[in-house]
Amino acid sequence: MIVYRVHEQDLAYEHGHLSSFKGLKIHGVDYKTLVRILGKPTFPSANSDQSVYRSWVLRWDSATYEIYDYNTFDEYFTTHQNTTWWVGSTEGVHTLDLINLIEDIASSLKSDNDGIN
């Protein structure tokens, strides 16, 4: 999996703007956990209409995906309370496998943390 970094925003935009939401979302994963899994967001600032505050553009299994908050309209909520993330992909690519992977890794991280006293 390749996650585009902030300094690669132009390249990410080339690929990411071709993605669209496919109807499935990541659930039960907070911002800090996504950062642990994916690293810092590709786009760490709000877009022009503030409908998205954080987004990651990544390449996985020869496809481009974008993971982002949508319509939280609140940066604090996005980074401290949000646990639902929209997932877009390039045309003809389903998002279920990526969503399951992210949720499984997040669950594993939570289990590891729960075992620490």
Image (cartoon, rainbow, N blue to C red):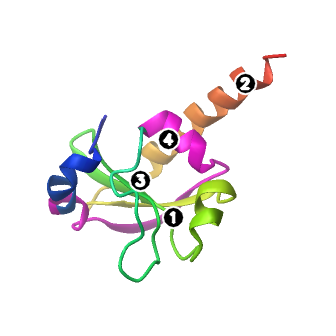
Label 4 is placed on what type of residue? Val
Mark 2, Cα crowd under 10 Å, few <14 / some 14-19 / many 20+, is few
Whether 5 is among the magenta residues is no
Which numbered disc flags the more N-terminal residue, 4 or 2?
4
| Mark sitting on residue 95 | 3
Which numbered disc flags the more N-terminal residue, 4 or 3?
4
Name the residue tied to disc 4.
35
Q: Please, what secondary structure does the residue beneath circle 3 have? A: loop
Label 2 is placed on what type of residue? Asn
Which numbered disc flags the more N-terminal residue, 1 or 4?
4
Disc 4 to disc 2, C-alpha distance: 16 Å
Q: Quadrant of residue 9?
A: bottom left
Disc 3 to disc 1, C-alpha distance: 16 Å
Disc 1 to disc 4, C-alpha distance: 13 Å
Q: Quadrant of residue 16?
A: bottom left
Q: Nearer the viewer, mark 4 or mark 3?
A: 4
Range covered by the magenta-colored residues: 14-38
User: In the rendered view, does 78 fall on the left or right side of 3?
Assistant: right
